[in-house]
Structure formats: C-alpha cells, structure tokens
Amino acid sequence: MVMGALQERRDTSLVGLLPLPGNLTLDNFAEINASIDLLRSLLNSFIMTAGVVACTLVFGLLVGYALAVLSFRGRGVVFAMVLLVQAIPFQLLMIPLYVMIVRYFDLADTFLGMILPFAINSVAVLIFRQYFLQIPRDIFDAARIDGAGELRILISIAVPLVRPAVLTAMLVTFIGPWNEFLWPFLVTKEAAMQPLAVSLANFSQTNGSFLANPMGAVLAGACVLAVPVVVLFLLFQRSFTSANLGSAIKG
C-alpha cells in the first residue's frame, strides 16, 4: 500500500514492490488532499471514533461492574442478553436503525447519528466483566465498610486495577469505528460530514478517473487512514499485559 501510494506511474508487477528512484513521488498525497480535504475527513473520523470510544468505556465499565460485582435479580438474564447481542449481525439491525436515527430522531448528517448505534459494545462489557471478576471481593467489601458508594468504588478502586482492560477495550473499539464505512455512508450525504473511509470510497467512484494515477491517490488516502491505528497500537502494545491484581491486598 505504501509503495503504491508513492508510485508516480502505476506498476503492478513484482518490480513495483521495490522503491525505484525514478518512480517515486509525493504527488498522490497532494492530489487526494486537494480532492477530498484530508484534514477535514480525518477530523470527522476522529470525532466519530472518540465519541464511540468514550461511550463504550463509560457504559462498558458501568455494565461490566454491575454484572461482576453487584448482586441483583435478573443478573444472569442480563448477561445472557449481552452474549445474545454478539450473535445478531449488525446488517440485520441496519434498516430499523436507519429508520429510527434518520426518520424519527432526525440525526442524518450529524456526529450523534453516526455514534449512537455503536455507543454500547458488548465485547467491551465482557472484557470489563472478566477483569472485574479477577479482583478479590475483599477489596470491595473493605471499601463499603469505609462508607464508599458503588460509584466511588468503581472510579477510585476498580478502574485503576483494570487499567489493562481499559486500554484493551479502547484499542479494540477504536479500530471498528475508525474503519467503519457502511453506516456513515448511509447517514451522511454532505461531504463535509463524511469520515475519511467514506470520502475515499466516494473519491474512487467519481474523481479518481481524472487523475494520472488514481489508484496511487486512493492508496495514499488509505495510508493516511491507517497511520493513526498503527501509531496507537505501537504506543500501547505493552499495556496489554495484565497487572497483578492480587497484590492489591495483603495476606
């Protein structure tokens, strides 16, 4: 992808995988930027992804904590429903979601309309639940004896102990909305509101044929789309290692 983005003339042979000095250029990046406004499209992708990640972390922590720590009637049913959600493909829900978001809520061409269907992630709920189950219950009992409420226990005690889960859920959630194409494509018609994945698809179908190397321009945009994910993973890859939760108590 990188070599294709740097080619002045498209070369699909095996030799084209090599960085030949006579066929290297940065014009593809300038052309894709002039056609779709990369900065604006990147900003739209960041806003959508940040909103999804924030909602996923907040709701995932709350639901995961409730399913792992709290005792209430129907907890098993709620957990079964969380598992059942994973068996339902998003494509099956797309039409009713589109009608609800666009027609009933009038959220077409808005960031909220792009974020809402992904606000709760069942995978994140399961991740947090499993991590919370590993924390010794003596920690929560001691906090309750000291007079701390459940929300205070979650924020001050539970969340710092499951920091690897927070980073894991953040990275897993980030990749999905960042690369999401179909839903933003359905709910956004204005080019100024479309994330980068949708802008690249529209560019390849319309303006791409007028360029000297249209595939190189598309690959240049794909490189820009991939950079944040790669950088994020390289920065936080060591944080996947789980902390020793048992060291939080003595004896």
Image: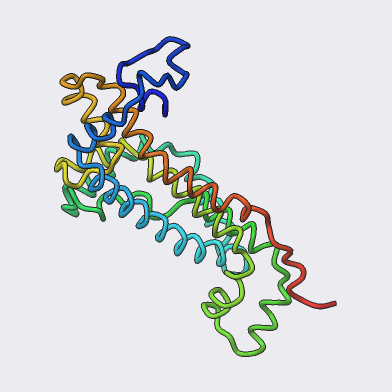
Q: Residue furthest bottom?
A: 146
User: In the image, residue 135 lies at what x, y percent?
Assistant: 69, 67
Judging depth in this view, the residue of 199 and 135 nearest the camera is 199
Judging depth in this view, the residue of 178 and 77 nearest the camera is 178
Residue 137 appears in the rendering? yes
User: In the image, residue 243 lies at what x, y percent?
Assistant: 69, 62
Position of 232 compared to 146: left or right? Answer: left
Q: Quadrant of residue 31?
A: top left
* Above or below: residue 187 compared with residue 137: above
User: In the image, residue 110 lies at what x, y percent?
Assistant: 20, 52
Residue 98 appears in the rendering? no
Position of 175 compared to 64: left or right? Answer: left
Tally of numbered discs: 0
* Above or below: residue 96 compared with residue 203: below
Position of 43 compared to 165: left or right? Answer: left
User: In the image, residue 76 lies at what x, y percent?
Assistant: 59, 57
Q: Residue at x 72, y 66 (%)?
A: 245
Q: Residue at x 70, y 83 (%)?
A: 142
